[in-house]
Image (tube, helix red, strand yellow):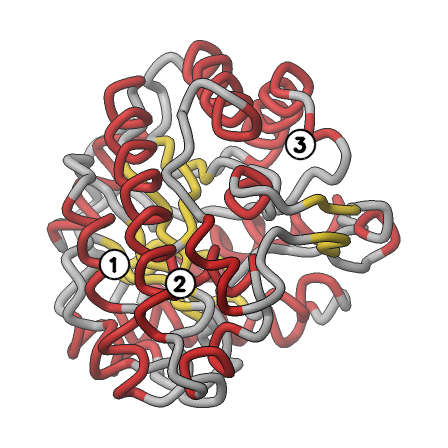
Amino acid sequence: MKKKIPEIMTKPERIAAAIKGNPVDRVPYSLWSHLPMIDEDPVQNAEHTYAFYKKYDVDILKTMNNGMYSAAAFGCTIDSSDVPKGGVTRITSTPVRNPEDWLKIEPVSLHTGTLRREQEYLKLLLKKTNGEVPVVFTVFSPLTTAKKLCPDLILHVKRGHGDKVKKALKAITETTCALVQRVIELGADGIFFATQLSSYDLTEEKFYREYGMPYDLAVLSASSGWCNVLHAHGKNIMFPLLRKYPVQIFNWHAWESLPTISEAQLLTGKCIMAGLERMDITDHHKNEIEYQIYETLRQTGGRKVILSPGCVIRYPLDEEMLLFVRKAKEEIEEKMAGK
């Protein structure tokens, strides 16, 4: 017997139903990338993000902010020239080089620099989308920002300068909380909260409980959005800690790293946003992508899931491959519903 399909939903209705675990007319999905160089101009970034949304018809739209905007807000200078060639943005100078420099980090005004730029980008994007798709604004965890300010952060803590680091973390958290509250006021439906050090490969759990979690939770509590996303970046994530974070949607590098799809859905109790291995998209691995879509839909039954990559799809983008993702999802979904 075929499953009963609800009547056609709007994108906000579809995402709200997925969060609650209710039936959906079709499994929602999303894709996102960076827009190197473009993301330094709010007008161009809004136009290109909107064009990306319209081309791929995603059900939830993650803002494609400059990946270093939070570090730049606190004084870093960056170079994105390698990104269009498949590289990453590099920090070329930073205000924190020795332990005493942490004491110089103060809260930053939302009305200046990159924080002002990213708010302007969001305003323009929200005007274009006009409520037709949920928009989540990308925010970095305070510890992620701090580590970009100083690669030696963990070494400084080990050498007894933890109090200095915490002072900076407090200032970064205050600024990040203010930004979160502001973007929700502007109309964002939630935040995409990216934490990049919550991995057993990078830090110890004791360290993260002290220098990561309290500041993460402060930022998450600042968002009154209805579809906040936790992005647990990297492999070997601290899943026992992160699965309890107060968000509606859980995103991680599925297929690259544990947990499995069904494990994550069961143990978080949340809507998961995952299922696609981003490098298989970049490397044009169609068989692998079809398998991942099939397994994700099989393990979840198409409920409480938003099909998406585990992380940003890197440049250069392959338009044909991105269009293939949605086509494959629809074909597999239709076949599975007809069983």
Q: Where does the image place residue 279, in percent across and percent down from the top left?
A: 67, 69
Q: Residue at x 32, y 57 (%)?
A: 167
Q: Earlier in the sequence, mark 3 or mark 1?
A: 3
Q: Where does the image place residue 113, in percent across and percent down from the top left?
A: 56, 25
Q: Is residue 181 above or below residue 227?
A: above
Q: Residue at x 56, y 30 (%)?
A: 114
Give the amino acid type for the residue marked by disc 2 in the picture. Leu
Q: Earlier in the sequence, mark 1 or mark 2?
A: 2
Mark 3–mark 2 Cα distance, whole angstroms, equals: 23 Å
Image quadrant of residue 16? top left
Q: Secondary structure at mark 3?
A: helix
Give the amino acid type for the residue marked by disc 3 in the picture. Asp
Q: Secondary structure at mark 1?
A: helix
Q: Is residue 83 visible?
A: yes
Mark 3–mark 1 Cα distance, whole angstroms, equals: 27 Å
| Left or right of residue 116, residue 222 in this image | left
Which of labels 3 and 2 is toward the front?
2
Between 14 and 122, the one nearer to me in the picture: 122
Where, quadrant-wise, is the C terminus in this rendering? bottom left
| Left or right of residue 333, residue 73 in this image | right
Give the amino acid type for the residue marked by disc 1 in the picture. Tyr
| Left or right of residue 96, residue 17 in this image | left
Q: Residue at x 65, y 53 (%)?
A: 94
Image quadrant of residue 188? top left
Residues at circles 1 and 2 in contact by the CB criterion of under 8 Å: yes
Pointer 1: residues within 10 angstroms few (<14), some, or many (20+)?
Answer: many
Between 74 and 28, the one nearer to me in the picture: 74
* Residue at image mark 1: 215
Q: Secondary structure at mark 2?
A: helix
* Residue at image mark 3: 39
Mark 1–mark 2 Cα distance, whole angstroms, equals: 8 Å
Q: Is residue 89 visible?
A: no
